[in-house]
Image (spheres, rainbow, N blue to C red):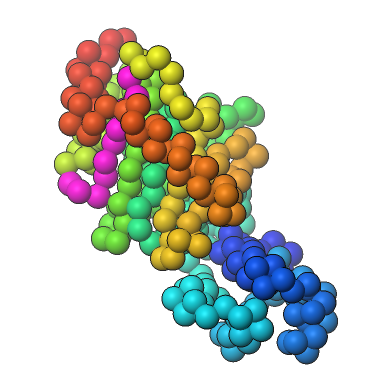
Amino acid sequence: MPGRQNPTFRQRRLGAELRKMRERAGLGGSQLARTLGVSAAQVTQMESGKTSVSMDRLQTIAAACNCDNQLFIGTLSGISTRKKGWWERYRHQLPDTLLESAEHEDFATGTIRHWASAIIPGLLQTEEYARGVFNRHLPPVPADELNLRTSFRLERRARFLEDPRKKLEIYIHESSLVTRYGGTAVLRSQLHSLIDDTAGEAVCIRVIPFAAHTYPGPIENFAYSYGQVPELDTVEMEASTGPIFYDSLNELESYRRVLDRIEKSSLDADESRDLIHHTAKTLKG
């Protein structure tokens, strides 16, 4: 049976975890293949997300790798049997890179910590602000696709914020509060929306002010999501060609340290809220 040509984020992540499980056990692909009674090529297909992995097969792999972390194995079983998500309605209409961000957000089971240096993160964007962001693309996005991208982004926002399991910690530089995607009126409305978003407990926004000498993080925007088990934490780095995902333990630890340093450089939540309100009030143009 031919493998998938374009495995999704979730399928690739399941395969990556199987590979890491095998490597921790000190097994080569051929060794595991002999234990499973399959070809080495089939093991490669599973570990690249190109072949489905049944619950029984997953349990057999875990036993062969001497993995007895039942919470971790159970979480992987949930990934392997997961039904298609809401974003699949947009498949073949929007770039797969946009769908992968939504799938990553759905994959997270707790808090997502997001750093952005010069833009309001997508999960908190208003409709007109999102249009302003998409309109900066060169070459310009066709009108039909612009409408579809905007609708998709708003659905991402709504579904995430409606999920009681999830929380959002946003860290932004003050430059994000004055960069006018869509114009001054659009930005002012966006800032008021941020104030409304922080009224509850699901969203916390922290701002690094211009007065800070520097900020201890990358220029690129990234999100750190917490999984059901620590092994399934994920970092999503934004890039012009689409998101790049990191999941090795060393990479995850590095980004946690970066976020902790960013947090120490930020105003607290109340001070940040006051700054956003003041900026919205004093915008000119």
Q: Is residue 85 above or below residue 284?
A: below
Which of the 4 image quarters holds residue 179?
Answer: top left
In terms of depth relative to the viewer, which is nearer, 19 or 91?
19
x, y (%) of residue 133?
Answer: 47, 31
x, y (%) of residue 89?
Answer: 51, 62
Q: Is residue 52 above or below residue 17?
A: below
Extreme residue in the top direction: 285
**Residue 209 visible in the snapshot:** yes
Tell me what residue is drawn at x 38 percent, y 25 percent. Answer: 173
- The kind of secondary structure the magenta stretch mainly shows is strand
In terms of depth relative to the viewer, which is nearer, 229 or 281?
229
**Residue 106 visible in the snapshot:** no
Q: Which residues are magenta?
A: 200-209
Tell me what residue is drawn at x 39 percent, y 38 percent. Answer: 260
Q: Is residue 190 above or below residue 227?
A: above
206 within the magenta span:
yes
x, y (%) of residue 200?
Answer: 17, 46
Name the quarter where the N terminus is drawn.
bottom right
Tell me what residue is drawn at x 75 percent, y 80 percent. Answer: 32
Is 268 on the left-hand or right-hand side of 179?
A: left
x, y (%) of residue 248?
Answer: 59, 54
Number of numbered discs present?
A: 0
In terms of depth relative to the viewer, which is nearer, 158 or 252?
252
Name the quarter where the C terminus is drawn.
top left
Is 227 on the left-hand or right-hand side of 50?
A: left
236 within the magenta span:
no
Is 204 on the left-hand or right-hand side of 265?
A: left
Tell me what residue is drawn at x 64 percent, y 29 percent. Answer: 139
